[in-house]
Amino acid sequence: MINHLKKISEDSTKKLYIWGAGELGRSLADTLTLVGVKFDGYFDNAYPEGQRDDDSKIYPLSYLREHIPENTYFLIGSFREKEIMAQLREMGFTNIYCQCELAMYYQDEFPKIKFEKCDNPEVSVLVTAYNGWNMTYNTLKSLSENGNQCKFEVIVGDNCSTDLTKQAEEYLENVRVIHHEKNLRYLGNMNAIAKEARGEYLFFCSNDIFFTQKGYMDILLAEAKKDPRIAMITGKLWVPFKKKYDVHSVYVKLRECKEVEPDRPRNVENMWPVATIIPNRVWKEMGGYDTVFLPVYCEDTDIQMRMIAAGYDLVAYPYAECIHYGGATDKWDAKDPLLARNRALFDERWGHYIEQETDKREKYLNAR
């Protein structure tokens, strides 16, 4: 990606901006400068009229009207990525990169990825996507090269993307691509494509995953088959920009979790469902994600608690490992009223169990 940004910055017909003039945006600017990427300045919603300081220029938002969308590029240096991406797309811009993409390989071309035709899959790989084609492509490419021996199908759910995701069939062979008529967000998208799955097991595959350990899916599948109580099993997730693992966790109290030690298999209560095996029978028994949480937030933590309440286990399995770049799908927005609403729904449903049924929780957590 750095080389791609260098080419953009060296092309006099193109403009490269950082959106965000705060601490994160300035840090990204310093990083880009060190590796030889030149950028043309900042935009920031906090400075709609622009601002000039000794080191750089924040342009007024009105200046964007003079830009040709195809020749304008943005790297978002803000914790409000989702909101800014939506804002830029509404203005007609499509060349938008989030911070996590700096760690990814950028494809200038997209040779067709070929999966084996599978009429009787054991596993259905489910990928949800809304733009971020470069990330989706790299995820699927790494899956195709991962050497899994299980028979699997791949289903991609497209939430009305405006980038090459809308033409995904041209770049993928033996992959079912389902283009939704409207953006269903993550919850609706996953519920919809899971209904199309033919496999005995589902593999939830976020489109910001990169598989480094050979046979990642095979490793988790073998463990899932050993114990019918396992409802979710996920490996270790390395996050390059955090320089740490996204570690699964247990509840200390409502809305407060503690990460578990990542060095042994164990039951957990809160799991990142981004590269995860789930038996299809359990998913159907749960009825998928509860639509009361539409369009987004808390649907994953709710289904995990429902699985535990039904007598199943969520297993963190450290002997399978992949990279999770993070940030390609729906992002949490602390100021979004939907988050407050859905957290209240979750608290009402599970607060008693988390904070009062101590003996039951200890028995579950110590069972593995």
Image: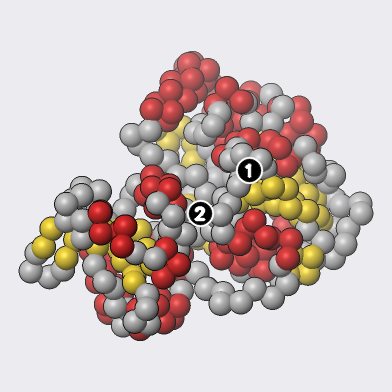
**Is label 2 in a helix, a strand or a loop?**
loop
Residue 315's spot in the image, x, y percent?
Answer: 63, 43
Q: Where is residue 136 in the image (x, y as percent from the top left)?
A: 60, 60
Task: Determine the residue positioned at 71% across, 27% down.
Answer: 286
Q: Position of residue 206 (x, y in %)?
A: 60, 52
| Residue at the image position 38 percent from the left and 33 percent from the top | 336
Q: In this view, does 207 lie to the left or right of 101?
A: right
- The mark found on residue 328 in the picture is 2
Closer to the chain start, of discs 1 and 2, is 1
Pick the residue in front: 233 or 151: 151
In the rendering, which numbered label is found on residue 315? 1
- In the current view of this chain or complex, which residue is farthest to the left? 54
Q: Residue 214 falls in which quadrant of the image? A: bottom right
Residue at 88% in and 62% down? 117
Q: Element under label 1?
A: strand
Question: Hey, which residue is sitting farthest front in the picture?
Answer: 66
Relative to 80, 220 lies left or right: right
Q: Does 287 sit above or below residue 142?
A: above
- What's the amino acid at mark 1? Val
| Residue 256: numbered disc | none
Of tags 1 and 2, which is closer to the observer?
2
On the rendered structure, is 85 left or right of 216? left
Can I make out residue 26 in this image?
yes
Q: How crowded is mark 2: few (under 14 residues within 10 Å), some or many (20 or more)?
A: many
Q: Would residue 225 be seen by someone viewing this image from the given angle?
A: no
Disc 2 marks which amino acid? Ala
Quarter holding residue 8: bottom left
Residue sitting at x 19%, y 61% = 58
